[in-house]
Amino acid sequence: MSRRVQVVAGFALAFLAVGGFLWTVGPAAVAAQLASADLGILAVGFLAVLAAMGCWSEAVRRLLGSTAHSVGGHRYRLAYLSGEFLKQVLPMGQSGGPVLMAYTISRETKATYESSLAAASLFAFLNVVSSLVLAVGGLLLLILTRRGPTGALLRTVLVAMVAVTTVVLAVTTLAVYRRPFLERVALRVAAALRRPVGRVSSRADPALAPDVVRDVVATYADSVGQLAGDRRRVATAVTLSLVGWFCFLLPLYTSFLAIGRPVPYALVVFVIPVVTLLNVVPLPGGLGGFEVALAGVTATVSPVDLPTATAAVFLFRLSNYWFLVLVGGLAAASLSVGVRDAPPVVPASDEDRV
C-alpha cells in the first residue's frame, strides 16, 4: 500500500470515528454550542499554537547547537513545521516524530541526520517529562481548589498518574545506569508481543524485530545520556518546552471561554497531557480516539455536559490540529517536502517492499 493511500485511508477511518462519536453525543446539541462561539476569543488560540511551535522549534535548535551544528533562520523554521506536518498526517506519525523531524531538518539545513535525530529524540523525551510535570501540577491545583475529580475517580486518576510517572522514571533510570538490563527487558517484551500483534498488523512484526528494538533502546539511552552533558542548553530546552505547552494548551481554555462555559485552566493543563500520553490510536494525529477521550475525560472531571465538552474539543482541534496541518502543509509545500518521500516511521514489511 502506497504512502498516499495509507494517509487517505487513515483520515477516512478517523472521520468515521469522529462522525460516530458526534452522532452518539447528539449533532444538534453540539452544533448549537458551536454556533454560539465567539470568533475573537477563538483567534487567541490560533496565535497561541504558533507561539508554541516557535518555542518548541527554538528548543530543538538549541539542542542541535550542542552537537556543533548551528542552524536557524527562515529555512530551519519551515523545516521544523514541515516535520510537524508529516507527524500530524502520517499514521503512527506521533510515535515517529523524531525520525520525521530529523528528516526534514537534515534535508533543509547543514545539520546531519544523526545529530538532528539525537536533538529531536532528546526534545521528545523532555517534552513528555514537561507534560507530566504540568499534568501533576494541574491535578494538585484542582484538588486544592476542590474543582477536580473526587472519590473513586480521583483514586483512579492518581493511580494512573503515578503508574505513568513511575514507568517514565524507571525507564529513564535504566537507560542511564542499567542500559544492558533495559535492552534485555525490551527484547523480551517485544518477543512476547511480536507474534500475537503481528497477526493483526503486518508492520508490527518488523517493528518488534530484535535489531529494531536494540536501535530504539540505543537511541533512547543516548538521548537521555545527553542530559548530563550541556546542562544549560537542556535547562533552556525544558523552559521552552514548558512555555510551549502552556501556549499549546491555551486553545482548549479559549474554546470553552468562546462558547460561554469557562473551565479552570488547571483542568486544561491536567487533561490534555494525560489524554495525549494515553492516546495510542494509530491514525493521523490520533484523530478519533483523541477527541473521544478528551471530551469524555473533560466532561467527567468538570461541571460541563458531554455535548458542551465535545463542542469545545472540536473548536480546540481546529487550532491544535487542523490549523497546524495547514501551516505545516504550506511550509512543506514551499520546501517541496512530500508525504511520499518521508522516511518510514516503522520498518516496511516484506509484503510492503513487493
Image (cartoon, rainbow, N blue to C red):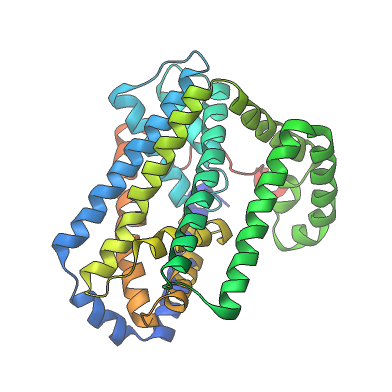
Decide if residue 296 is on the left or right side of residue 225.
Answer: left
Decide if residue 30 is on the left or right side of residue 119.
Answer: left
Residue located 48% across and 35% down the image? 101
Q: Foreground residue, 275 or 147?
A: 147
Q: Position of residue 140 (x, y in %)?
A: 49, 61
Question: Residue extending furthest front?
Answer: 144
Residue 103 sits above or below residue 166 on the image: above
Q: Quadrant of residue 141?
A: bottom left
Q: Foreground residue, 265 or 321?
A: 265
Residue 188 sits above or below residue 36 on the image: above
Residue 8 sits above or below residue 257 on the image: above
Residue located 19% across and 56% down the image? 43
Can residue 306 be seen here? The reply is yes
Q: Foreground residue, 300 or 35?
A: 300
Residue located 50% across and 45% down the image? 130
Badge count: 0
Q: Quadrant of the C terminus?
A: top right
Can residue 284 be seen here? The reply is no
Decide if residue 198 is on the left or right side of residue 66.
Answer: right
Q: Position of residue 250 (x, y in %)?
A: 31, 55
Q: Foreground residue, 135 or 210?
A: 135
Q: Position of residue 180 (x, y in %)?
A: 83, 33
